[in-house]
């Protein structure tokens, strides 16, 4: 057999890089490396500075629903100058009489115990609300001949004189079991009912269109009175939040504004007598100072501690409202070691 001729090797697909090609590749690799270095260093800088990535649509954020106030002056109370907390479900509101300090809901745990002043511009009411009418005459019912007693208000209870004075006039009421439940918080609708008892008006009122007040809500007439007389306001989104607890400083602001109490020359100096004056929201300092100078403030157990942002209790609101009526010349003063006297 004859051997076949040797096969010539095929030319290689690879060839030696030329000088120009090598330079081009070096430049390309250098560029890629520079881009990667810049990206990694920028990410590290962002992490060091606490840069927050904006969540994509539909993503949940821990800050969702948090309203950043435009300065503390925007943290009003839904009163007259109101934590944002979710309002209770309208359908769960107790069907109780609308006069006096009505009993608190039978399920107080349904309402959050801590109140943070909502971000509301002072003096603003919902667009659907009518203009504030001139305040009606302050009317304090005559005292009944027989004192009203409550089984859970002892003779030496600190607020008993204030509770008794208002209960004897029907301004505050107790529960069907004979108790007063002095330590329970007061909701915004219950406070409105208290205002209605004192500021009665014969003027026909069109209901104010708050979108969280259901039809035939028990406190609608009281809420109308409280808003139209300047004691309370709604929230910018058109709600009233009837089941939200009302705080101590919110009540003081409501009474000062509703009664049109004059503001002292130096409110900041006046409130310095409180050990916790730094906790008073900026918007409420003038009202707190006015209430202090007129003797409306009653602090228990420490007279020098205001606890401005705590939900006001039924006992505390009885004391404060009594003192407001004393300042208005409608009730006689009651001796108490807990009345703040600047």
Image (spheres, grey):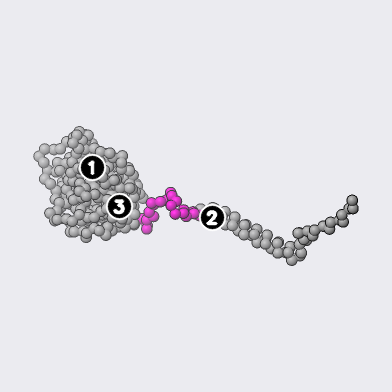
Asked if residue 223 shows in the view, the reply is yes
Q: Residue at x 22, y 34 (%)?
A: 152
Cα gap from disc 1 to disc 2, whole angstroms: 52 Å
Q: Mark 2 falls on what kind of element?
A: helix
Neighbourhood count class around disc 1 (C-alpha, 10 Å): few under 14, some 14–19, many 20 upward: some
Dot 3 or dot 1, earlier in sequence: 3
Relative placement, left or right, of 198 versus 305 is: left
Residue picked out by circle 2: 46
Dot 3 or dot 2, earlier in sequence: 2
In the current view of this chain or complex, which residue is farthest to the right?
2
- Magenta part of the protein: which range? 51-72
Q: Look at the image and say whether residue 276 sits in the magenta stretch.
A: no
User: Residue 9: where, in percent of width, then height?
Assistant: 82, 57
Cα gap from disc 3 to disc 2, whole angstroms: 37 Å
Depth check, mark 3 against mark 2: the one in front is 2
Name the foreground residue: 36 vs 307.
36
Q: Residue at x 33, y 44 (%)?
A: 114
User: Residue 303: where, in percent of width, then height?
Assistant: 29, 44
Q: Residue at x 27, y 50 (%)?
A: 212
Q: Mark 3 falls on what kind of element?
A: loop
Above or below 176: residue 295: below
Q: Mark 1 falls on what kind of element?
A: loop
């Amino acid at each position: 057999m004859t051997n076949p001729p040797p096969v010539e090797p095929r030319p290689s697909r690879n060839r030696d890089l030329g000088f120009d090609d090598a330079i081009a590749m070096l430049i390309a690799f250098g560029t890629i490396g520079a881009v990667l270095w810049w990206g990694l260093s920028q990410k590290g800088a962002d992490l060091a500075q606490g840069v927050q990535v904006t969540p994509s649509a539909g993503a949940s954020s821990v800050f969702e629903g948090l309203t950043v106030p435009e300065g503390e002056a925007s943290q009003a109370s839904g009163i007259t100058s109101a934590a944002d907390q979710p309002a209770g479900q309208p359908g769960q509101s107790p069907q109780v009489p609308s006069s006096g300090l009505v009993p608190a809901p039978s399920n107080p745990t349904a309402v959050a115990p801590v109140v943070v002043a909502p971000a509301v511009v002072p003096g603003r009411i919902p667009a659907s609300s009518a203009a504030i009418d001139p305040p009606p005459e302050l009317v304090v019912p005559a005292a009944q001949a027989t004192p009203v007693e409550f089984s859970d208000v002892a003779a030496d209870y600190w607020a008993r004189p204030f509770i008794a004075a208002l209960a004897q006039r029907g301004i505050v009421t107790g529960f069907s079991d004979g108790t007063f439940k002095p330590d329970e918080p007061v909701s915004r609708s219950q406070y409105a009912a208290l205002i209605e008892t004192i500021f009665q008006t014969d003027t026909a009122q069109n209901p104010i269109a708050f979108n969280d007040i259901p039809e035939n809500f028990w406190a609608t007439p009281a809420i109308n009175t409280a808003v139209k007389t300047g004691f309370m306001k709604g929230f910018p989104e058109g709600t009233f939040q009837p089941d939200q607890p009302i705080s101590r400083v919110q009540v003081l602001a409501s009474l000062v504004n509703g009664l049109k109490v004059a503001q002292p020359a130096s409110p900041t100096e006046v409130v310095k007598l409180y050990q916790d004056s730094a906790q008073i929201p900026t918007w409420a300092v003038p009202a707190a100072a006015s209430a202090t100078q007129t003797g409306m403030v009653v602090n228990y157990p420490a007279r020098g501690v205001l606890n401005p942002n705590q939900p006001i209790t039924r006992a505390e609101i009885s004391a404060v409202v009594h003192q407001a009526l004393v300042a208005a010349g409608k009730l006689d003063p009651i001796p108490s070691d807990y009345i703040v006297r600047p």
